[in-house]
Amino acid sequence: MENSNYINNINSGTSPCIFNKSGKHLGAYFLHDNSVMFRLLTFRDVKNVTLEIKPKNKPVQKYDMIQESACVWYLVINAGIITNGDRYRFVIDYKNELTAVKDPCSMWQDGYFKWSRIYNHTLFNWTDKKWMTGENPSKISRLSSETNKLLPVEALRIYEMHIGTLTKEGTFKSAKNKLDEIAEMHFNAIEIMPVENTYSFNWGYDGVDKYAPNHTYGTPDDLKELVDYAHKLGLNVIMDIVPNHLGPDIAELQNTGPYIEGINCFGYKFNYENDECSKYVRDFIIGAALNWVVNYHCDGLRVDMTKFMCSDFTMKEMVAEVNYHAPFVFMIAEDGRDNDNRVTNNFTPAEYEENELKHEQFINKIKQNDVSLAALGFDTEWDFPFHKQIAASVLGMWDCRIKNLCDFDYSLRDAQTRVKYIMSHDEIGNIDGTRLISKILAKELNLESCVCECKPDIMCKYAAHAAHKLSVSFITGEYEKMTEEERKIFCKQNNLTVCFSPDEVFNAYKQAVKKHKLVLGKVYSIPGAKMVFQGDEEANLSYFKFFRKFSTGSEPYLRDKGYEPGLSAFLDSKLTSVVPSEKYAYINNAVRNYVRDLNILCSKNIALASGHIEKTIVHENSDTHAIYTRKIYNEIFSVSNFSNISYKDNYGIMFPKGKWREIFNSDEIKYFGEGKYLNNNNIKEQFSYISLPASGITFFEKV
C-alpha cells in the first residue's frame, strides 16, 4: 500500500500532516498559500474562543474563532499576518470565565508556560529524499519486499537512547555528535525516548505538549537535523510516544477541553471512549503520532504501554491512520499483556483500504467502535516474557521468574517476531537505578547477606546500590588507591558489613562482565529485532535513575525506588558520569568491540535477522542452551553456557546435519575473554566435542 499524497509531499519538500476527510487537523499549521489554519478542541459548552497573535515587535492582535462542531473551533488567518516563530494562544469563554491557554497541539514551545509559537514545517531543508522514498537499502520498512529491497522490521538492531543523558550537554545537537559512534558500531536504528514537551528535565513519559519537542533539548529544527543526519548515516529513527497518559503538569490542558477522563496507574488518562468529544481526542493523539513520522521523518513509532490506553479501538485507529498516511513506517507496541497475539495480528484483507474513500469508511467504523479487535495491526512489540527470562538466567531470579532454562526456551516461541532486549530504561530505572552489571556483581559478592539491617523488601536495592558504588570505585581506580582502613569506611558508608579486597571486587566485576556479554550474545542469537540500551554496548556503569521535575514539585511516593527522583538523579544518569581509569578503559573498549561484532554478525547472516528457529537444545545439567536458526542458504548454530564451568574440547553436543565452523566466540581476548576456549577453524559434524567458555556463547556457521 502506497499513499500518493505522502510520497508527493516528500518529493516536493513539504510535509503537511493531513489525515481526515476535510483535510484539516487540530492545531496550527500553514496551508499551501501561506495562510494559517487554527483548530482547537475545547469544551462543548464554550461560548466563544478568541485567537490572540503576538507578532514580533507588534501589539497583540485578536480574532474571534468560528465554531465548527460542538467541540471544535477554527479560523484561517491570511498570509503575512502571522509568520514562522510568532507567538499565539487561545482565550476561552467558558462558564462565564475567560481563560488564556496555549495550543494543546503546539509544535514549538520555548518554555512550558509561555505562548505557543507557530512553526512552518515546510521551511526545513531536508536532505533525505532518497531515504524517505525508499531508495536507500538501509531503510527498514513494514513494506519490505524483494522488489523494493528494503529491510524488514525483523532486521532492526536498535540503540535505545535518552537525549538528556546521552551526552554531557543533553541536547539534540550534542546527540547528533554521538550518532557517528552508534553507526560505527553497526546499529541500524536509534530509538529516542519520548521528547514530548513538559515543564523541565524528564524521562519523557510525562509529556503534556504531545506535538512539541522538549524545549530543554533544543528547537524543532534541532531535532530535524538529528533525524536528517541519522538517515545520512544509515540509521533508522524510532520515536517513542506516550498515548496512555499525561503527566502532572496538565493544568492548562484541563482548562482547555475534554482531553482527560480519570486516572490510571501512570497519571491522567485520555478521554478516548467516554463521550461525543472522544473522537476528537483520538484525532488529537493520532495527529501527534503522524506529526513525528510525517513532519519529523521518523521511520517507526514505539508506542508506550498501549494496554493502559484502555482503548484497543484507539490503538487500531492509530495503526490504520499511520499505515495509510505513512505507509513505510513501522509500529512497535509496548503492550504488557504478555504477548497477546491480537496486538501484532495483521488486519484482515477486508480491513486493508485500497483508496481514500474506503479508508475513511474504515476509520469511521473504528470511531464508532464497530470493528473486530482480533487484530490491532502493530508490526511488533517489546517482548516482556523473553526479557524476564533472560534476566533471570543470570540473576537467578527476576520479576517473579526463577532461572530455568526450560522456561527460557519456552519464551523463544514468540521472540522471533518481537523486540528482544535484556533491560530497557524501565528495568534499570524503575527498580533501583543500577545496570545489569551492578546487579550481577551484587549476586557474585552475595551482597544481600552483607548489607546492614533493613527491611527485606528493600534489601536487594541496598545491595544493588552498594554493588554500583563498589564497581564504579574500582573501575575509576579509586578503590585500589584506598588503604585497608579507608576501604572499611567506604564499605560501611555504603551499608555493607563486610569489606572486600580489590581482587575480590575485580573478580566479581570480571564475572559480571562475562555474564553481561553472554546475555547480549543470546539476544543476538535469536532471529528478529534486537535492542540495546544506551551505555550497555560498552558496559557503562552510570546509573539510569527515574528523574523528572514538575512545576508542582516532586512526589514523595517516588522515593521507594531507593533514590530521589530530582536533579541529582538526572545528573547521575548521564552516560558521562562514570569515566574509567586508563588502567581499566580497555574493558569498556572490549565490550564495545563485542557488541559491534555482534551487529556485524547479524548484518551478514540473514538467519540471525529474519530467519526462523528450527530447533533448540536444553542441557539442564550443564546449564547449556543451543539454538539452530535458518533462512534460505544461511544456517547458524549458537551454543550458550550459563554455568561457571568452562569446557576445553570436551563438551559434547549434537549439531544439525552438515559441516560447521565457528565464526564468533565471546572468549576471544579482544572481547575481554581468556582466549582459551576457542574452536578456531575446526570443522564440526553432528555429535561433536567443542570448547565452551564459562558464562559464554559461541556461534557456528554451516559451511
Image (cartoon, grey):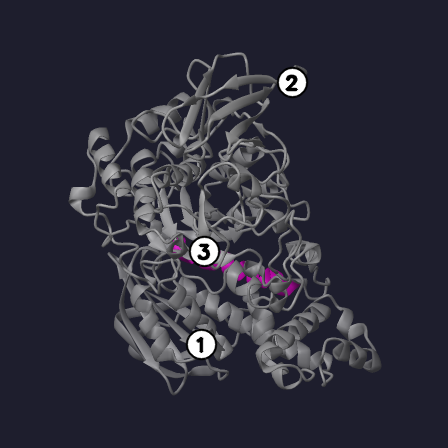
Does the magenta stretch mainly form a helix, a strand or a loop? Answer: helix
- Assign a secondary structure to mark 3: helix
- Residue 254 point in image, percent of width and height: 52, 42
Q: Which stretch appears magenta?
A: 586-603
Distance (Cα) linking label 2 and label 3: 50 Å
Q: Nearer the viewer, residue 604 or 89?
A: 89
Asked whether residue 85 appears in the rendered view, the answer is yes
State yes or no: residue 602 in magenta.
yes
Disc 2 crowd rating (10 Å Cα; few below 14, some 14-19, many 20+) is few
Distance (Cα) linking label 1 and label 3: 31 Å
Q: Earlier in the sequence, mark 1 or mark 3?
A: 1
- For residue 400, the mark is 1
Q: Nearer the viewer, residue 497 or 71?
A: 71
Residue under pointer 3 = 599
- Assign a secondary structure to mark 1: loop
Q: Is residue 348 above or below residue 673?
A: above
- Residue 303 point in image, percent of width and height: 41, 49
Residue 122 left/right relative to 60? left
- Assign a secondary structure to mark 2: loop
Q: Nearer the viewer, residue 91 or 417?
A: 91
Asked whether residue 677 appears in the rendered view, the answer is no
Residue 274 left/right relative to 114? left
Distance (Cα) linking label 1 and label 2: 58 Å
Q: Quadrant of the C terminus?
A: bottom left
State yes or no: residue 474 in magenta.
no
Q: Quadrant of the N terminus?
A: top left
Q: Is residue 333 above or below residue 26?
A: below
- For residue 56, the mark is 2
- For residue 540, the mark is none
